Each structure stands twice: as C-alpha cells, then as structure tokens.
Amino acid sequence: MEKQDMRVLTLDPYQHGVVINALNNLRNDLIEDKRPTDIVDEVLIKTVDAPSKSKRVKQKDER
C-alpha cells in the first residue's frame, strides 16, 4: 500500500460552516445532474465529523 500525504486545515466555526455548505451544494448539484456523489459524500462526512481542537491562548501575564 502506498503512503498517502495528509493535509490538516485549521478553520474557525464560520469557515467550517462555509465548507460544509459548499460541499452540500456541490452534492445537491451532482444529484440534480444524476452524477455520482461518492467522493463528495466522503469528504462531507469527514468535514462534519472532524474533531475540534481548542487552542489555549497564552495571556501576557502568564509564563
């Protein structure tokens, strides 16, 4: 099996919503055109299920 490169995107909640909406719109267009949606479905599910990771912002008085 060939090693695949992985990509990580850091998105704020608004950007995450935009990506989900764009993928869903693309999926709807494909369905309307009676074209396969397999890859879009896969990416949409990964995007929806992606874990969130909180960044701890260091305050000026903390060391």
Image (cartoon, helix red, strand yellow):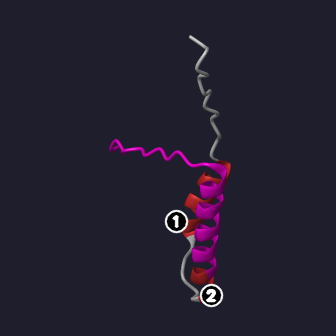
Q: Is there any visible trace of residue 43 in the rendered image?
A: yes
Q: Work out which residue is located at the far left of the displayed protein and give it.
A: 2
Count of marks overlaid on the render: 2
Whether residue 45 is situated above or below residue 41 in the rendered picture: above
**Residue in the image at 55% along x and 59% along y:** 43
Q: CA distance from mark 1 to mark 2?
A: 16 Å
Where's residue 8, x and y in %? 47, 44
Q: Quadrant of residue 56?
A: top right
Residue 32, image x, y percentages: 62, 87
Q: Secondary structure at mark 2?
A: helix
Q: Above or below — where is 40 with respect to 33? A: above
Tell me the element at label 1. helix
Does the segment drawn in magenta span residue 60?
no
Report the magenta residues as a range: 1-28
Q: Is residue 10 magenta?
A: yes
Give the labeled residue for mark 1: 39
* Residue bearing mark 2: 32
Task: Mark 1: give few (<14), some (14-19) or many (20+) Cα within 10 Å.
Answer: few
Amino acid type at circle 1 is Ile
